[in-house]
Image (cartoon, rainbow, N blue to C red):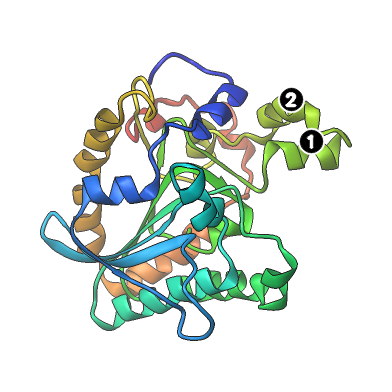
Amino acid sequence: MSQKKTAWEIVKLARHPKRMTSRTLIDLLFTDFIEMKGDRLFKDDQSIIGGIAKCNAIPITIIAEEKGKDTEDKIKHNFGMPHPEGYRKAIRLMKQAEKFNRPIITIIDTPGAYPGIEAEERGQARAIAYNIFEMMKLRVPILVIILSEGGSGGALAIGVGDYIMMFENAIYSILSPEGFASILFKDSQQAEKAATMMKLTAKDLLAFNVIDQIILEKEGLHENPLYGIEQLKKHLGTNLTKLMKQNKDSLLKNRYEKFRSIGIYSEEGENNDSSEDQDNI
């Protein structure tokens, strides 16, 4: 991996204004992308984009959280904070993928689900919970890519996967370091201290078996995006092919056990050497 960074330095890199967004990743990684819109209930939420595409000539369904690039684009995409209709669009496309036996690839990049009153009125919490529940049962492979920020339920609503890949300078956590510091220290200015405590880096999460693989970035996606893309391409097709070869019942069983085991602590593994982790970097 590149030069060691503090957790707070990684937080800042994950939020870097020049870091690529999901739409750029889709354009560079997949071919023949056709976007599909709307949840068939309320409206189209542009914080989540999705549709069908090809990955190494394999038809897939792609669902991604999109932050936007410049100010106007960020407002259009609500800074990557989905409303409930965004999550309903996502699960609609996932069930369509299951019907046509297409693997699903999701891209996580959100500070969290939109917390506004109107989102709560339209069932934000239920939409997130429903997606998690339904994704656990989908009888097609699900591969998850954590691009930059993965915040709380906003990420989990499209984050139930059979294999989870995370970029080196991304973060994945229960809430933002600022929110954590506000709760724990009653002071959001202590976010840097909170970031260290939260164990939100790719290296931490690989050690905890929350993710399965780290995608290296070298100088960072904001400086050299093509290097990170090539690293992702190297592993994406292989992992997708492996998942597609699994028996459907085994796929569901492994997915369920994967998420049920998160948080289970064993003292036996506390001092284990990290050499095994190196195979997944």
Q: Residue at x 40, y 44 (%)?
A: 21
Looking at the picture, tell me which residue is in the foreground, 74 or 58. Answer: 74
* Spatial CA span between label 1 and label 2: 8 Å
Residue 222 marker: none
Secondary structure beneath dot 2 equals: helix
Quarter assignment of residue 254: bottom left
Q: Residue at x 37, y 79 (%)?
A: 95
Residue 104 in the figure: left or right of residue 135: left
Tag 2: amino acid: Lys
Give the residue at mark 1: 181
Give the residue at mark 2: 193
Quarter assignment of residue 183: top right
Looking at the picture, tell me which residue is in the foreground, 121 or 134. Answer: 121
Residue 246 in the figure: left or right of residue 84: left
Tag 1: amino acid: Ala
Question: Residue 65: where, in percent of width, then height?
Answer: 45, 56
Q: Residue at x 19, y 57 (%)?
A: 241
In the picture as drawn, the residue positioned furthest to the left comes out as: 57
